[in-house]
Image (cartoon, coloured by chain):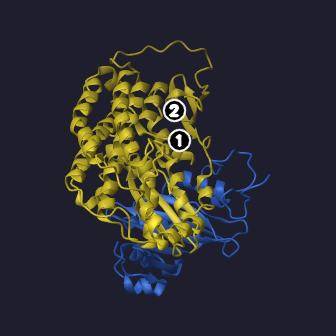
Amino acid sequence: MSVANTFIGKAAVLKGLPEHPAVKAILAWNPQALADAKFDRNELTLTIAAEEIRAAAATVQAAGYNFFEDLTAVDWSPSSPRFQLSYHILSHAHKERIRLRVLVDGESPSVESITPVWPSANYYEREVFDLFGVRFDEHPNLRRILMPDDWVGHPLRKDYPVEGYR
Amino acid sequence: MTDVAGTPIREAPIAEGARDQHMVLNMGPQHPSTHGVLRLVLEIDGEIVVRLYPEIGYLHTGIEKTCEAKFYQQVVPLTDRIDYLSPMANNLCYCLAVEKLLSLEIPVKAQWIRVLLSELTRLNSHLVWLGTHAMDIGALTVFLYTFREREGILRLFEAVSGQRMMTSYFRIGGLSMEPPLDFFDRVQKFIRTFPEKIDEYSNLLTGNPIFANRLKGVGYLSAADAIALGVTGPPMRASGVDFDLRRDMPYSGYEKFQFKVPVSTDGDCWARYLVRLIEMRESVKIIQQALNGMPEGPIKADAPKIVLPDREKMKTQMEALIHHFKIVTEGFGVPAGEVYQGIESPRGQMGYYVVSDGTAKPYRVHMRNPSFATLQALETMCKGRMLADVVAVVGSIDIVLGEIDR
């Protein structure tokens, strides 16, 4: 496995990968929305401002990143902002994957749903809501998906007890 | 409305006011054709499906949460249990992800054996799919034929790893042990006769008018819908999207193998059946290439602080014993970072997202399992069709509930 160049930080990525289709599309759309960027282990991560995620998803979709592959969250508790959402988006044409990263606060976390852009995000957003308690505004059916409907708590949060009687 | 032979079906007289009443029907969670513990809530108008939504989570065991409490190497057996029909695909995806985090170089022989066993896993999984799918439709015989060959594959798995199903054979940094001396000969023997066996299944099913009528034109999914709903793998390719991670974004040395990716534009259950049959033939070709060109060399990476030492070395070398003790009791630190590794599992695009904070335990492991996304397309495929077609469609998308619920 050859380790390619690593660019940490927005300025380094913009300098190192000026011709990358996703970077170009995001810059042409709204340079302010790109909060941070990273190119590490051959994977491009673009950190997007939380309120802009749906528009950013539509932008990369128009740039050829046509397939929504995965969405999940990471709980960075106790640091702030607490939740990181990672959207993995694949391009059939460029044969490449990018990661859109959104940071959300721990206090009543919520972001815009990207289901209008990719209906396939439906189950993934429900899963993140179920297991992390991050709400997705305008989601068509934001119910628990894996845990029972009357479950209390969000099991994949780091402060969720892993042993003992609840 | 016509029956399968094209004869118009006369509508039964319906009482006044009853026409607009829909019935809600629960299919599952204990239903033999749902391939596990899947509950489908169907809203039906007579026999026509008006709405359908899957209720999942009956098999949720919190594997992602469990991973956070284990050392990196202890997660490997957990990945077996996600998809009991393709354990090696899960092992491979997880190991590749952690190796990417570690920037660890894997010996060529280990890569080739991984490819060989991944393709055997694909055959194993497709055989179970074919047997159960045909059984759902009513062709009970095929099941016995496919399980005969599946038994052969499970014996190969047992020979190589000691386990028939929960193999845990791929480890971080290579393989758990050398395959037995006669292993490649046994694979060769199996592969030599396997294409004839595919002909046998094809003879039983492809010309079977009942089977064909139950599948042709049923469960249509367009290419645009497949992409919009996250469908991957054989169902996506049967809808006309020509994309296969093995060919387009190769991993574990797949770029060295020649194979075709079957694509159909019909988008129905029949196309999915044909695509998977051709995929099995292509897998045989890949296995043959792996056997012919199997390189010599070690099967574990040269990383004593990550890969467990051989048993013999442990008994004779002080350092090996120390490394063994340290790895087993303390694990090994993995550089902080996040990676996503995608592979083409038998059911579609699988992905493991591993986040490390620099300690010996993963901070977060997330699995993108193909069945989970494919299930979203079920309503699109079944809407407006007969109730009995739901069984055919569920069979044709080849879901495993273990990997949906995790």
Q: Nearer the viewer, residue B93 or A56?
A: B93
Q: Is residue B264 visible?
A: no
Pick out the residue farthest to the right: A165
Q: For the residue marked with disc 1, what is the amino acid?
A: Leu
Residue B83 vertical position relative to residue B203 in the rendered view, above or below: below
Colour in which the image shows chain A:
blue
At label 1, counting other C-alpha atoms closer than 10 Å, the crowd grade (few under 14, some 14-19, many 20 or more) is many
- Residue A133 on image: x %, y %: 68, 59
Identity of the amino acid at label 2?
Thr
**Helix, strand or loop at mark 2:** helix
Pick the residue in front: B323 or A89: B323
Residue at mark 1: B401
Q: Chain of mark 1?
A: B
Residue that mark 2 sits on: B34
Q: Residue at x 48, y 59 (%)?
A: B352
The reply, left or right, for residue B274 in relation to residue B393 is: left
Horizontal and vertical percent for residue A34? 51, 78
Q: Reply above or below: B384 against B3.
A: below
Q: Dot 2 falls on which chain?
A: B
- Name the mark on residue B366: none
**Residues marked 1 and 2 touching at CB (< 8 Å):** yes
Give the x, y percent position of residue A86: 53, 66
Q: Which chain is yellow?
A: B
| Front residue (pair B75, B18) | B75
Residue drawn at (25%, 27%) of the image? B200
The N terminus of chain A lies in quadrant: bottom left
Where, by quadrant of the figure, is residue A4 drawn? bottom left
Q: Earlier in the sequence, mark 1 or mark 2?
A: 2
